[in-house]
């Protein structure tokens, strides 16, 4: 029986559009845009200026503090300017613009031997390479690998669930490069000092389960765990519950129950950073949806404009209605296709008018469906109502900060209430209140 968690939903998968398309590399664009903030935490501080010549892999900006990450050039070329520009998040951010050269020179780190490298060297390499989680949150990977003293970590889990509809880049990576993913898993286990490793994969990916099972067969204390196909099975807390049986309490982190979770792409990136000295200058992503003429799985240079990626895939169909970066459940709709691909971009999704159609909002029916499916046992309709009425302290008391914003409640809501929209607003206001309290204490 496949492992799983309480709640969740079963949106249409949509993966058939791209699941059989091998990963291929996108040609270089005419202009590359490298935002200084591609991660949770403080933006990086630029080390280059207009007119500077840069190489592929060169450090462009250094981390600003513990929760930050350096930024590297994804191409060889000349810096044309540093200015604010659009990003997939919808918020303009400072970015370094580069015009690529015809010839490419790489400036990578010195390779390290994966078999003899020390834990401290792995963490240092991950930090200097600017690796961030590729599951969507873009949390600096080195921070996850540096738990506070006294926190005993028992599990290192690789998230191969890829539960978001449409997306297939992790699936292709597990089929095409299973050994690199497992090598990254072993390095992550060594860095954290754990003996138990697991790879969680949903049962709708039998080829990936087969490939990864073969890749770990001679690796001690590492196992592949088939998971029930259900959204959001790939969320950290759900993955930990399904594989280990442990529940992460509200307000706590995976490390509080002795677990560290990393994405498939992150594991591969760790291996390449150690073995090849390679910073994440390119990212794997899926370009798909009914609004894309030729769905593909691609390796794309970080900083490539979204419009160039779409053009490489044949462009948008005549009935394309909406472009989303990420998956349909947690992704962000785009207003400017000149925004660049980032280190943690997992997909570019174009929905047709039919796919994107949504009925008008009606009053809450009190049906309780959002409560039944919430994977973290919240009352979504109440949280949304409190936020809507600006009762933010009450929303805090009812657990608004625990919400993962997975969108499962919105998917099942027959009244089409934008629950996550209101909950996200509530979280922002509660976070501001908490900052004021800390400043006053």
Image (tube, rainbow, N blue to C red):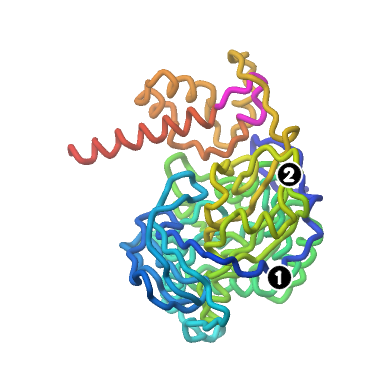
Measuring from the top left, give residue 80's x and y in whole percent: 42, 67
- Pointer 2: what residue? 291
Q: Nearer the viewer, residue 31 or 292?
A: 31
Query: Foreground residue, 85 or 350?
Result: 85
Q: Which residue: 71% across, 47% down? A: 316
The image quarter containing residue 156 is: bottom right
Would you place residue 189 above or below residue 409 in this image? below
* Residue for point 34% across, 70% down: 49
Residue 40 in the figure: left or right of residue 106: left
Q: Is residue 261 visible?
A: no
Is residue 162 among the parts visible in the rendering?
Answer: yes
Looking at marks 2 and 1 on the same chain, the residue that comes earlier in the sequence is marked by: 1
Q: Residue 3: which disc?
A: none
Residue 70 placed where, x, y %?
40, 67
Q: Position of residue 440 (x, y in %)?
A: 18, 37
The image position of residue 358, as x and y in percent, is 67, 27
Q: Callout 2 environment at 10 Å: few (<14), some (14 to 19), or many (20+)? A: many
Tell me which segment is drawn in magenta: 410-418
Q: Which residue is mark 1?
A: 178
The residue at the point 65 percent across, 58 percent down is 309
Q: In the figure, 275 relative to 376: above or below? A: below
- Residue closest to the eye, 44 or 41: 44
Q: Quadrant of the C terminus?
A: top left
Q: Is residue 312 above or below residue 76?
A: above
Query: Residue at point 59% right, 64% down?
Result: 283
- Asked if the stretch drawn in magenta spans residue 34, the answer is no
Spatial CA distance of label 2 from label 1 is 31 Å
Q: Nearer the viewer, residue 365 or 93?
A: 93
């Amino acid at each position: 029986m496949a492992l799983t968690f309480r709640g969740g939903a079963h949106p249409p998968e949509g993966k058939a559009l791209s699941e059989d398309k091998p990963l291929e590399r996108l040609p270089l664009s005419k202009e590359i845009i490298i935002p200084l903030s591609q991660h949770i935490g403080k933006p990086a501080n630029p080390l280059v200026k207009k007119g500077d010549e840069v190489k592929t892999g060169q450090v462009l900006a250094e981390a600003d503090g513990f929760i930050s990450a350096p930024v590297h050039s994804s191409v060889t070329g000349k810096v044309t300017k540093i200015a604010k520009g659009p990003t997939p998040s919808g918020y303009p951010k400072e970015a370094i613009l580069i015009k690529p050269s015809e010839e490419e020179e790489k400036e990578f780190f010195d390779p390290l031997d994966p078999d003899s490298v020390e834990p401290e060297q792995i963490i240092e390499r991950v930090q200097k390479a600017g690796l961030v989680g590729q599951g969507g949150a873009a949390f600096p990977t080195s921070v996850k690998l540096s738990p506070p003293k006294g926190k005993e970590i028992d599990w290192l889990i690789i998230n191969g669930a890829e539960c978001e509809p449409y997306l297939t880049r992790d699936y292709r990576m597990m089929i095409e490069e299973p050994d690199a993913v497992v090598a990254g898993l072993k390095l992550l286990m060594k860095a954290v000092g754990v003996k138990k490793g697991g790879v969680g994969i949903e049962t709708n990916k039998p080829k990936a389960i087969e490939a990864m099972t073969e890749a770990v067969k001679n690796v001690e204390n590492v196992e592949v765990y088939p998971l029930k196909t259900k959204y959001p099975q790939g969320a950290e807390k759900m993955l930990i519950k399904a594989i280990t049986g442990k529940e992460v309490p509200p307000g706590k982190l995976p490390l509080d129950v002795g677990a560290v979770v990393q994405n498939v792409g992150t594991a591969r990136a760790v291996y390449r950073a150690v073995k090849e000295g390679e910073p994440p200058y390119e990212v794997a992503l899926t370009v798909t949806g009914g609004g894309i003429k030729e769905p593909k799985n691609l390796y794309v240079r970080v900083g490539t404009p979204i419009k160039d990626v779409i053009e490489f895939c044949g462009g948008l169909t005549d009935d394309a209605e909406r472009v989303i970066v990420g998956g349909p459940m947690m992704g962000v709709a785009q207003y400017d296709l000149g925004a660049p691909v980032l280190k943690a971009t997992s997909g570019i999704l174009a929905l047709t008018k039919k796919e994107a159609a949504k009925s008008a909002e009606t009053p809450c029916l009190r049906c309780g469906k959002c409560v039944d499916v919430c994977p973290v046992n919240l009352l979504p309709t109440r949280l949304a109502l409190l936020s809507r009425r600006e009762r933010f302290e009450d929303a805090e008391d009812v657990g608004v900060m625990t919400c993962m914003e997975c969108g499962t409640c919105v998917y099942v809501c027959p009244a089409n209430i934008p629950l996550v929209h209101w909950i996200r607003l509530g979280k922002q206001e509660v976070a501001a209140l908490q900052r004021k309290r800390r400043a006053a204490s």
